[in-house]
Amino acid sequence: MKAATLSHETDFDGWRRAARCFRTGRVSPADAVFRIGDRDAGLFDEVALSEDVEVPFGVPKAFVDVAQAVILHRTPDRFDLLYRLLWRLKDEPDLMKVVTDIDVADALERAKNVSRASHKMKAFVRFRQVEDERGEAWVAWFEPAHRVLERTAPFFVRRFTTMRWSILTPDGSAMWDGQALAFGAPETRDMAPTEDEIETFWKTYYASTFNPARLKTKTMQGEMPKRYWKNLPEAALIHELVAQSAGRTDVMVARPAAEPNPRLAKTLVRINRDRSFDEGFVPSTLEELQQAVQSCRRCPLWRDATRGVCGQGPRKAPLMIVGEQPGDQEDLAGQPFVGPAGEVLDAALEQAGIDRQDVYVTNAVKHFKHEPRGKRRIHRTPLVSEISACRWWLDAERSLVKPRVILTLGATAALGVTGRKTTVMQARGQAMAQPDGSTVLMTVHPAYLLRLPDEATRRDERGRFVEDLRRVRGLL
């Protein structure tokens, strides 16, 4: 028997060095022993570990990822399981893909348990307020199912960046001072506060959100296992809330329905009236189209946008330019291509000898799709379903303007105009006849030029963009 000593229970680097040393020395899994510290010292032949052990073969990343999780499991034979897999990987390089293999299935299940323990820690850590020489701080006591403290602590750094906090566990402690994350020795339950002033408010809030009509006790206990209840302040209320749920549900059912909000009812009537265009509305002017798009409910994008943004330009423009969707500035202004991408387009049109005043510019999607990030609204690419839903408006614009040439900027615009997905870089610059007699030519979106990493590339690509516009002028 050969033994290797690891420095602590989650010493992955130490286990990896020892496992390499064992595998190079052809120590079989039955003869390999991994121990923590001085445990079982003197019972087996100690192996001296070296940083320079030559790796006899490579292992897939899938094994490394699983091993880093399994090492956090509390089962004492986890090191043996991982070494058994490592031993087999040399002759079975695709072993980790065989999920029905007993060792692989065991490792994957343990990794899953560790991941679940990390998730539960994120959900069930409860901080309590304390005061120290620096002022306000927050301390929590938690007993994770597996040794996931170091793995999970960065989540709390991101979540509570402005707080000074400590998480104490039987395995170790994590401390965040607002600048750096540090880890310390294991602690005991008595080192953490048992209550604070905020706890009363938290219990009141929890009780007020408890819906007896939707109570499923088994599901609740599955998501909030009882092993965590002793450290959750709200757990003291659960038994009483569950016991009262039947009576509270009967009261809710017997209570007469509330009168509908009259203001909401009027709003719904107006929305339903404005949506009448869905069935038979045919706009006769661009102004009528612009007004109607404000009531569009064909897809959910209207909910987060400021307004619908239709096109702009002369009624009988020979050239129609179609972009993707309004951006942040377009959404606020109610006009297409007035932001940074619009400035790039204006400059390129001028360079190509095309007067923007003679062009009808619009977008395939009429509402700004975005996600909030701080105070900014970040652009998100529309889905195919959203592009298809908005094609009704684009077709209406085309029927009113009747352009001879349509220039599409990017893949979303190409899909909106032609109705099929197209690789813009392959079809770029090719004139394609359409059933309505117009000609479509595809190119990149001006926003693409703004995202290019260096000046030389931007200069070359802007030159190609201007050449595409000159090709459009030739078609006109």
Image (cartoon, rainbow, N blue to C red):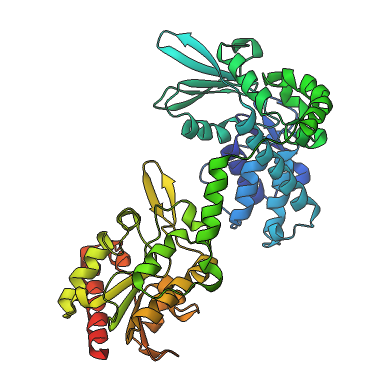
Position in image of residue 106 (x %, y %): 77, 47
Q: Residue at x 81, y 22 (%)?
A: 244
**Where, quadrant-wise, is the N terminus in this rendering?**
top right
Q: Nearer the viewer, residue 89 or 188?
A: 188
Determine the image quadrant of residue 8.
top right
Residue at horizontal 74%, vertical 46%?
109
Residue 52 point in image, percent of width and height: 51, 46
Q: In the picture, residue 234 is in which quadrant? A: top right
322 on left or right of 422: left
* Residue 400, position as x, y percentages in the image: 37, 79
Q: Is residue 260 visible?
A: yes
Q: Nearer the viewer, residue 320 or 66?
A: 320
* Residue 454, horizontal then vertical, whole percent: 24, 62
On screen, residue 253 versus residue 145, left or right, reads right
Which residue is painted at 68% across and 20% down in the image?
A: 231
Foreground residue among 143 and 34: 143
**145 displayed left or right of 404:** right
- Against 296, residue 203 (above or below) is above
Quarter holding the C terminus is bottom left
Q: Residue at x 47, y 9 (%)?
A: 131
| 388 is higher (above) or lower (below) than 442 | above
Q: Nearer the viewer, residue 254 or 238?
A: 254
